[in-house]
Amino acid sequence: MAFFSTNKYKIILLLFVASVFFIFYIRPLYRDSTNKSGPAKLKSLVISSKDLNDSESILRLIYELKPKMPEIFLKIESSLKFDCDFNEINCQVSHLPDLNDSSWKTIAARIKSMGVKINFIYDLNLNNFNYKMHFIKSEYDKTNRSSKTRSAQSKKLIFSDPNSLALIEIDFRKKMALGDFEKIYFGSDLDFYFSLIRDETVFKKEIDKFWATLKNIKKENLHKVVSTCFNYEHLRSYFFWGALNRTEIHNLEVLCLSSYPTQISWAKKYGVDLQLAVLEDRTTQFGKDYFDSLIPNTLTKKTIHIIGFGYPLLKEDDETQLTLLDNLEESLPSNVELIAWETPNRAHATVPTQHYLFNQMLLWDIENFELNQSGYRFFK
């Protein structure tokens, strides 16, 4: 009887300790994360290679915005191009000419001279970037999900192949030297790339080597913020937090996410047309709880940056766009510190699906690069 009595008191004590831990630690974190009335979010822009032809106009816009925009993000493409066959578990690498490096170096120096901090996103060219949100469905269609490749133990793709990884590290350092960057983001939406790997052994090796690479970059840049960028819709809709290693995500200094709220349509099981048809009637509405799955998956008061937000609209009138921006601001948890708007593609749509893929909302007039009403609302 003494044994059971002793254990009963131990259980009661453990339950008491667990209750205190929840009340004074976990619950405040959850409550603070769900609070959407925190300080105003910092606003920024993501500049990529498609903006280089308009660099002078972009620089003028940045100069006008610098009182409201303390930092900016340069998304620089790798000079390495990987062509991967996910059925054969094989990638071929080629070298591209560094045609834009001098332009990037000039832009980085000029932005820095304005007193605006510059951050670096290393954008790895995999299958001509077709692994990303807009085109991922075509990559899934090419992947045989039912077959297993023989001798997968010996197969390597990119990060798990020492030769490819060595080339990436050289190219990455070369791009890093183009500017005096404050924050470093290695990879953009690479969660989509990982999701194309069907063999579990290769998948695990590739994920492990990726995180090891990120840690090595941090060792070389101890005084800079080092992170990576994933896509929120993918992590949320396919519970991909765990597949990427939730512990490693928690350990990131800053959690960087892209977000395209209507483009959950790349899904494996449904056609893109069907998905977009469902979304067409609510092009400015998404629930105020849209980003709430960040809370259980980040748990702590981790700083989150939404880098690359895109929301295509069928209606391009000012009222519709302003409504969208208000809804966006209200939906973000308090630990989302910054939103960076990526300049959209300039292509004009001819069919509804293309409209959703390309006609994203602009914050300025294309002709004169002056802020429109939406731009003033975003940077208010």
Image: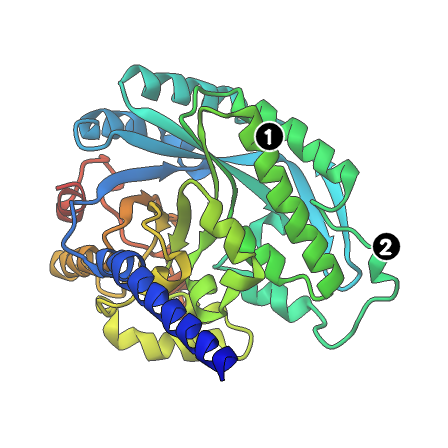
Numbered label tally:
2
Disc 2 is placed on an element classified as helix
Amino acid found under the numbered disc labelled 1: Phe
> 117 or 353, which lies in front?
117
Q: Is residue 367 above or below residue 198?
A: above
* Residue at image coords 42%, 40%: 253
Q: Position of residue 5 (x, y in %)?
A: 44, 79
Q: Is residue 36 above or below residue 117?
A: below
Q: Position of residue 308 (x, y in %)?
A: 37, 48
Q: Which residue is mark 2?
A: 154
Does residue 194 appear left or right of residue 374 in this picture?
right
Give the position of the C terminus as an image quadrant: top left
Tell us which disc is closer to us: 1 or 2.
Answer: 2
Occupied quadrant, residue 98: top right
* Residue at image coords 51%, 19%: 102
> 291 or 265, which lies in front?
291
Q: Which mark is residue 293?
A: none
Disc 1 is placed on an element classified as helix
CA distance separating discs 1 and 2? 26 Å
Q: Is residue 182 above or below residue 39?
A: above
Residue 318 visible in the snapshot: yes
Q: Which residue is mark 1?
A: 172
Residue 56 visible in the snapshot: no
Q: Of marks 1 and 2, which one's residue comes earlier in the chain?
A: 2
Amino acid found under the numbered disc labelled 2: Ser
